[in-house]
Amino acid sequence: MRKKNIRIFLALLLTFVMAMMTACGNSSTSGKGEEKGTIKVGAVFPLTGGSAYQGKSFKQAIELATKEINAKGGVLDRDIEVLFEDDKGIPADGVNAAQKLITQDKVSSILGAFNSSVTLAVRGVTEQNKVVQLTPGSTADDITSPNHPYMFRNLMPNNAQGPAMAKYATEELGIKKVAILAENTDYGHSGVESYQKTAEKLGAKVSAIEYYNLGDKDFVAQLTKIKNLKPDGVFIAGLLTEGAQILKQASNLGIKTQWLGLGGFTNDQFYKLSEGAAEGMVHVSYFEPGAYDYFPDSKEFVGNYKKEYGVNPDMYAGNGYEAMYILAEAIKQAGSDDREAIKNAMSKMKDLPGITGPTTFDENGQAEKKMLFVKIQDGVRVPIGESK
């Protein structure tokens, strides 16, 4: 009986050990380079709130890119799994989302955020945990400032697009007297600074700078001050929800001027939300569907996106789609989902082909990207020039 009991015990022990080995073999990545299961990538974007239009574009494009990558065998013979968290456009929510993704979900890296203040807040978390963060949407200058080795960006900052817009407006559109209206955020302040410095250097006069808060709905006080100054143009450093309301209220006040902006208005919903008041506005864009003279490698993406979602991709979709491919290539070059190896691969990336042009990151994680000037004509954004 004793021998029989020993045999039973050994058999049970062997079964338990084999079960544990199988479970470990099938476990997903911990962010430390395990070689089984999916490769987890975190994504922090505003899926609700005032920036939900942009958040939806990022999410759809990233999901499309992930679907394509996995259909071709994934990365390192493993599928990519993207875990989305909603930051609502609020820095504190972004911090909580990043902490969850890193500590609980064990992601290898993070895409996001969109709102610059959220991205800067999230950067504190990713940097502390030594996790790569790639933003396809935030343009505040400080995001890719020196000494933040885990932060990367695949679009141009305000200190590039602001001066480019100021130069175009002053020299090409003849805007010599300009008023500025901006959101009271990192994005807005850096946009104001970059535009004002170049405009004044070129001889234009900035007659007023007015700020508003995200979520504001009444802009009559700021617009009345601007109306009395009779500027040649008004530059808005803001996003589409507030921007559309600004233009509607300006139209109601009878303000006649040339409206100018950064890339925050590059979404088809902007014209609709403005109820046509955005007609004639000129602003920056990093990607336009159908503009194949500028983005020759984007035709397949545009077709696939429209087939998948029934609408054309906007600038945010283009940047998000490309960001997913950039991160996938970094993981491939790293040879694993090890966080430090991914950072090293991102830092060494050079001339990676993409739908908005090749990607090379400088020593601060900033990529040099194309910038267009577009004008809203008959409700459609039309490219009218390229920043050199």
Image (cartoon, rainbow, N blue to C red):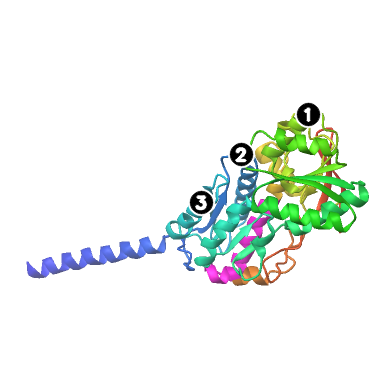
Q: Quadrant of the C terminus?
A: bottom right
Q: Between tags 3 and 1, which lies in front?
A: 1
Q: Which of the two residues, 138 or 194, is positioned nearer the viewer here? A: 194
Name the residue tied to disc 1.
Answer: 253
Amino acid type assigned to the residue bearing label 3 in the image: Ala
Q: Quadrant of residue 309?
A: top right
Q: Where does the magenta region start and end?
A: 319-343
> What residue lies at 69% left-to-right and 72% top-to-bottom?
363
Residue 159 coordinates in the image, percent (x, y): 75, 59
Q: Amino acid at mark 2?
A: Gly
Q: Is residue 330 magenta?
A: yes
Label whose residue precedes the other's in the sequence (3 or 2): 3
Q: Which marked residue is nearer to the observer: mark 2 or mark 1? A: 1
- Coordinates of residue 131 in the picture (x, y in percent): 54, 65
Where is residue 324 shown, x and y percent of the image? 63, 56
Q: Are marks 3 and 2 in contact (CB under 8 Å)?
A: no
Answer left or right for 81 relative to 259. Answer: left
- The answer to whether any part of residue 243 appears in the image is yes
Residue 240's place in the image compared with 96, above or below, is: above
Q: Which mark is residue 92?
A: 3
Q: Which residue is mark 2?
A: 215
The span from disc 3 to disc 2 (Cα, nearest Å) is: 16 Å
The reply to whether discs 2 and 1 touch (Cβ–Cβ < 8 Å) is: no
- Helix, strand or loop for the magenta stretch, by majority: helix
| Residue lying at 63% horizontally and 53% vertically, measured from the top left | 116
CA–CA distance between discs 2 and 1? Answer: 21 Å
On screen, residue 376 above or below 145: above
Q: Nearer the viewer, residue 237 or 32?
A: 237
* First reached walking from the N terminus: tag 3 or tag 1: 3
272 to the left or right of 215: right
Position of 325 with respect to 21 (left or right) is right
